[in-house]
């Protein structure tokens, strides 16, 4: 059973780097990769459901015709709803790559489960019948798959097949454009797909299903062993007729629909002795046969299973009736009373016994007495005297303290993120040093071009500035002001002699030119430094998305109200990471992000006595 990739293997992005592109999902891991893209397992945070995200290579996104077709097909597939089809939830484009979000099926593909293995005929018929029903539903909605093979059929935990990877799907009747590449898998693709791509219909998918059925029954591809399956494995000869019709070289002589093929398979499945099939004898197009409950399927495996259930039921009813009769109280009849014969008419209700009651005699005379007059109500009721005592103070129960250690959690999570950020920061600092050293070399070249009379003075000036920047972290300041410029502004700069040796520029002119070149070199190197800073922030942005996701997941775990202070601290950290520039980058570089920022080296910032600029 082969599962080759149609084009070169796609270099899948790392799951961590992909997380920032899908903020609504938690990317768990890379599941598989191939020529048609990469598939990741993820969790949709809003609905807390597992999903699979497939990323297509950028080459597909650059093809405008493919993009338009991909959008139309994704919308059509999202309307499909069938238990044997993998559901489509969303699609779009990120970073130049088309993606599609699908139902996640926790299981293996049919390729990985039955590679080179001949499985039981009834199980093969069950799996292929379900595949046919899923395809029939897709065909009814105008969608062809075009790449049915074991590698695109997943088996869930209950061995139910689900057709996936509609990456090659297209609406029925869509013509293939000139120059368009026709993909497919050798030995599974119908002949007309390669010869007459514009006339491809539902019967191309039926051809592929026939190949899959032959392979499941025999463990071999028809191209490698074209003998009928009954000859190879001894299965029912009716499988031969189904496969022969499904894989006929002429599309007109194949099944007209996948549901028709499913119906023939159901007829064979019901004929197996000692088996109670989970499939119906007649299968309406686009529906899935209903399985019997497992509790009854095991009891009905033998020919007398249903009889045993009936006998047990009758016996239980008799025992219950006897129990009710024995618990009924005895009637007041004597031992000599004959037992009445059984009758269907209800027994007459015996008369209730008469009980004589003797009334109590009333007294002969009754003396009448008037009711006593109520005592007069006083005008004012004195309050009762209550001894005053100091109340006993009741100490309130101490409020429970949060049990979650937020600082320890921050240390642990930040440590993990720093390990991930270390290679990025090391590369950034290395490029920063290269840029600064290139600036220094350019300055020294300009100094050497000056006359000897002024070279030492200008070199001392340049070295003093660059040494200060080197001690401040090998970073160029955003603004630049040379000491000579201050003299120019104040009018105190002494003019140099006119003309140099041999009629060349004077020392003053050379120094002026050098200052201009120094500023130009500074501006160019500063631009490179800014690009390095921007690249670092972009790389840190991807990691910060993972950091925020980890904090969010921890908040979801803290459901006890006593942990509200811990939740507040975590939310504050999320807000700082999202809102404060360079906050996360400083954390990863071991810099306190809340420390006051010092003005950049060489910046033209004069502090007033109060410390305000």
Image (tube, rainbow, N blue to C red):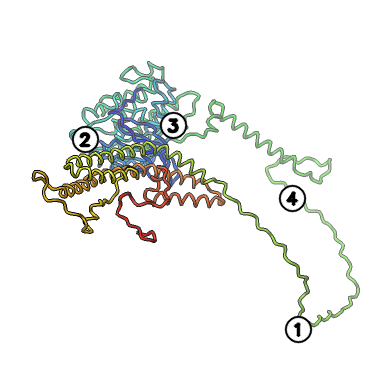
Q: Distance between the residues labelled 2 and 3?
A: 34 Å
Apparent side of residue 498 relative to residue 274 in the rendered image (left or right) = left
For marks 1 and 4, give the one nearer the viewer: 1
Residue at 53%, 48% (x, y): give it. Answer: 559
Q: Distance between the residues labelled 1 and 2?
A: 108 Å
In the foreground, 215 or 342:
215
- Badge 4 crowding class, 10 Å Cα cut-off, few under 14, some 14 to 19, many 20 or more, is few
> Can you see residue 93?
no
- Badge 3 crowding class, 10 Å Cα cut-off, few under 14, some 14 to 19, many 20 or more, is some
Q: Mark 3 points at which residue?
A: 107
**Which numbered tag is attached to residue 495?**
none
Q: Closer to the N terminus: mark 2 or mark 3?
A: 3
Place residue 440 in its image quadrant.
top left
| Residue 348, placed above or below residue 163 | below
For the residues labelled 1 and 4, say whether their Cβ atoms are less than 8 Å apart.
no
For marks 3 and 1, give the one nearer the viewer: 1
Badge 2 marks a residue whose secondary structure is: loop
In the rendered image, the residue lying farthest to the left is 503
Q: Mark 4 points at which residue?
A: 349
Q: How far apart are marks 3 and 1 (CA)?
A: 90 Å
Q: Closer to the N terminus: mark 3 or mark 4?
A: 3
In the rendered image, the residue lying farthest to the right is 364
- Badge 1 crowding class, 10 Å Cα cut-off, few under 14, some 14 to 19, many 20 or more, is few
Q: In which quarter of the image is the N terminus?
A: top left
């Amino acid at each position: 059973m082969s599962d080759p990739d149609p084009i070169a293997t796609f270099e899948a992005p790392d799951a961590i780097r992909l997380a920032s592109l899908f903020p609504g999902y938690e990317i768990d891991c890379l599941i598989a990769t191939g020529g048609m893209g990469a598939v990741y397992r993820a969790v949709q945070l809003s609905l807390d459901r597992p999903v699979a995200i497939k990323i297509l290579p950028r080459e597909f996104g650059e093809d405008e015709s493919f993009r338009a077709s991909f959008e139309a097909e994704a919308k059509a597939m999202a309307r499909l709803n069938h238990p044997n089809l993998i559901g489509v939830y969303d699609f779009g484009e990120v970073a130049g790559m088309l993606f599609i979000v699908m139902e996640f099926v926790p299981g293996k593909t049919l390729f990985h489960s039955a590679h080179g293995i001949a499985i039981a005929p009834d199980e093969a018929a069950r799996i292929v019948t379900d595949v046919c029903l899923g395809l029939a539903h897709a065909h009814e909605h105008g969608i062809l798959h075009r790449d049915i093979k074991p590698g695109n059929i997943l088996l869930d935990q209950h061995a139910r097949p689900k057709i996936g990877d509609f990456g090659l799907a297209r609406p029925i009747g869509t013509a293939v454009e000139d120059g368009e590449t026709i993909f497919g898998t050798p030995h599974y693709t119908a002949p007309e797909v390669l010869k007459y791509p514009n006339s491809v219909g539902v019967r191309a998918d039926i051809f592929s299903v026939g190949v899959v059925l032959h392979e499941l029954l025999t463990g071999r591809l028809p191209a490698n062993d074209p003998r009928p399956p009954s000859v190879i494995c001894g299965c029912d000869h009716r499988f031969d007729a189904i496969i022969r019709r499904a894989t006929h070289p002429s599309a007109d002589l194949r099944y007209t629909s996948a549901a028709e093929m499913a119906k023939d398979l159901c007829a064979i499945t019901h004929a197996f002795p000692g088996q109670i099939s989970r499939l119906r004898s007649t299968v309406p197009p686009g529906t899935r046969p209903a399985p019997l409950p497992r509790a009854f399927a095991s009891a009905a495996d033998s020919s007398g299973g249903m009889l045993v259930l009936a006998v047990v039921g009758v016996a239980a009813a008799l025992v219950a009736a006897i129990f009710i009769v024995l618990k009924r109280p005895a009637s007041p009849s004597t031992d000599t009373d004959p037992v009445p014969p059984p009758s269907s008419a209800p027994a007459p209700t015996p008369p209730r016994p008469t009980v004589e009651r003797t009334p109590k005699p009333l007294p002969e005379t009754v003396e009448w007495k008037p009711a006593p007059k109520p005592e007069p109500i006083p005008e004012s009721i004195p309050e009762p005297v209550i001894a005053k005592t100091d109340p006993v103070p009741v100490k309130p129960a101490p409020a429970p303290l949060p049990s979650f250690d937020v600082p320890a959690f921050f240390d642990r999570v930040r440590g993990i993120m720093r390990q991930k950020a270390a290679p990025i920061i090391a590369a950034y600092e290395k490029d920063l040093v290269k840029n600064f050293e290139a600036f220094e070399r350019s300055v020294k070249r300009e100094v050497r071009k000056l006359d000897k009379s002024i070279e030492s003075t200008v070199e001392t000036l340049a070295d003093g500035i660059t040494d200060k920047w080197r001690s401040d972290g090998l970073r160029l300041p955003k603004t630049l002001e040379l000491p000579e410029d201050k003299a120019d502004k104040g009018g105190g700069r002494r003019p140099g002699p006119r003309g140099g040796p041999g009629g060349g520029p004077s020392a003053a002119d050379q120094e002026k030119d050098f200052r201009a070149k120094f500023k130009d070199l500074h501006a160019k190197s500063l631009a490179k430094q800014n690009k390095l800073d921007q690249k670092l922030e972009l790389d840190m942005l991807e990691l910060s998305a993972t950091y925020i996701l980890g904090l969010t997941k921890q908040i979801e775990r803290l459901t006890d109200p006593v942990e509200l202070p811990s939740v507040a601290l975590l939310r504050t950290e999320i807000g700082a990471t999202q809102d404060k520039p360079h906050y996360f980058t400083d954390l990863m570089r071991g810099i306190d992000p809340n420390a006051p920022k010092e003005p950049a080296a060489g910046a033209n910032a004069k502090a007033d006595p109060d410390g305000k600029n």
